[in-house]
Image: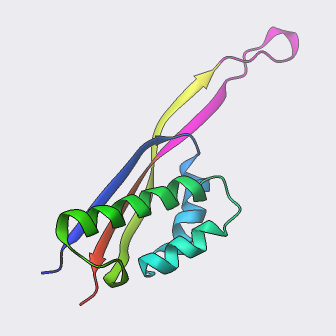
Amino acid sequence: MAQEITAKLSNFRESAQKTRLVVDLVRGKMVTEALDILSLTPKKAAVPVRKLIYSAMSNAEENFGVSRDDLVVYQIFADEARTRKWRRFGARGRFKPELRRSSHVTVILREVE
């Protein structure tokens, strides 16, 4: 069975819907190719996701002795995290909640067979 290396990013201050746009770009790609794609992606979520994949890659090299050229982004997904409700007042003193969404990102790397 192939070795799986996992890394998680919790409570990332971007909605899961926006983060999934970035995550979908790198699913199934080789790790070095995924890092190149994310370095050129002009979305806010691209920088933390790139750091997360780089961290998982470094963990694989240090802890398991796997070469970075043999790693593939096996699974990557963004789940919804806590939504903070902030108070905002609209016309005639009505309450309008402002929803501040966040997400959890999980990446699983696997060695190519």
Residue in the picture at 48% in, 57% down: 51
Residue at the limit of the structure toward the right, as seen here: 91
- Left/right of residue 31 with respect to residue 47 in the rendered view: left
Q: How many marks?
A: 0
Residue in the picture at 77% in, 15% down: 89
Residue 15, how many percent across, how many down?
A: 58, 46
Residue 96 lies in the magenta stretch: yes
Residue in the picture at 48% in, 45% down: 103
Q: Is residue 85 above or below residue 35?
A: above
- Left/right of residue 49 with respect to residue 64 in the rendered view: right
Residue 28, how many percent across, how many down?
A: 43, 80
Residue at the limit of the structure toward the left, as seen here: 1
Residue 20, how many percent across, how many down?
A: 54, 60
Residue 66, how many percent across, how many down?
A: 24, 76
- Left/right of residue 107 with respect to residue 12 in the rendered view: left
**Residue 71 occupies quadrant:** bottom left
Q: Is residue 63 above or below residue 26?
A: above
Q: Is residue 27 above or below residue 10?
A: below
In which quadrant will I find the C terminus?
Answer: bottom left
In which quadrant will I find the N terminus?
Answer: bottom left
Front residue of 49/105: it is 49
- Left/right of residue 2 with respect to residue 43 in the rendered view: left
Which stretch did the figure color magenta? Answer: 87-103
Front residue of 57/80: it is 57
Residue in the picture at 73% in, 22% down: 96
